[in-house]
Image (cartoon, grey):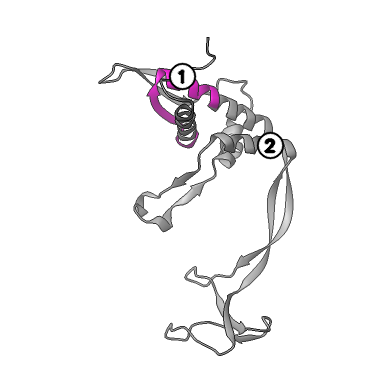
Amino acid sequence: MAKYRKLGRTSSQRKALLRNQVTALLNNGKIITTDAKAKEVKKIAEGLIALAVKEKDNFETVKVTAKVARKDKDGKRVKQIVDKNDHSKVLAESHRDKDGKIVRIENGVTVTVYDEVEKEIKKDMPSRLHARRQMLKVLYPVTEVPAENKGKKKATKEVDLVAKLFDEIAPKYANRNGGYTRIIKIGQRKGDGALEVVLELV
């Protein structure tokens, strides 16, 4: 007997379906699906949460210096014109004049101005890094669109689901040994009569 439900799909279709539903569950907190699918998704999701709980504190904070583009009051990058041959020689502080027209200077190139900033970052220990990669094998990338900017590509931002697992979901279940999700039956589906359930994080 098989140790998993085949769900009437080929292995590649089944894997894609389960990955999609696990991603949706961890991103939204709950999903509505059939009973058979929910039981398979539950197995995978609980495994990922258990991994996150185990490795949530396995990191060290490190100070690093990073180059960050300087921005003006409108949030646009500050650019200046420098000599083509000697980049340390500044020819003009801005690449636009007072009217907003682009300034052209012979032998000059436009470059972005960068500032060095000290940042504190979390550096994963080897076992946490391995756990992160195991999670990325299952989870799909998620992009979030704010409600007020629907239809605009610029407004979308990528959600780091692995970071959400480590920083938000895992601390909630730190004192819990398993049982991170629950299945609530909501009745039969119109059409094929399949039993529908709500699968949610406890």
Pinpoint residue 7: horizontal percent, then vertical percent. Answer: 43, 20
> Which dot, 2 or 1, sits closer to the camera?
1
- Secondary structure under badge 2? helix
Pinpoint residue 20: horizontal percent, then vertical percent. Answer: 46, 33
Report which quarter residue 9 is drawn in.
top left
Residue that sits furthest to the bottom in the current view: 106
User: Is residue 153 toward the left or the right of residue 78 in the image?
Assistant: left
The residue that appears at 43% across and 22% down in the rendered structure is: 37
Do tag 2 and tag 1 residues touch (Cβ < 8 Å)? no
Q: Which residue occupies the foreground of this view, 103 or 6?
A: 6
The residue that appears at 54% across and 25% down in the rendered structure is: 44
Label 1 amino acid? Lys
Q: Earlier in the sequence, mark 2 or mark 1?
A: 1
Residue that sits furthest to the left in the current view: 191
Mark number displayed over residue 130: 2
Report which quarter residue 50 is drawn in.
top right
Mark number displayed over residue 171: none
Mark 2 and mark 1: Cα distance apart in space:
28 Å
Pinpoint residue 157: horizontal percent, then vertical percent. Answer: 47, 51
Can residue 108 be seen at all in this image of the molecule? yes
Where 94 falls versus 31 (above or below)? below
Label 2 amino acid? His
Magenta-drawn stretch contains 40: yes
Q: Which residues are magenta?
A: 26-44
Magenta-drawn stretch contains 156: no
Q: Main secondary structure of the magenta part?
A: helix
The 10 Å Cα crowd at callout 1, few under 14, some 14 to 19, many 20 or more, is some
Residue ID for mark 1:
6
User: Is residue 159 toward the left or the right of residue 121 in the image?
Assistant: left
Can residue 92 be seen at all in this image of the molecule? no
The residue that appears at 42% across and 58% down in the rendered structure is: 154
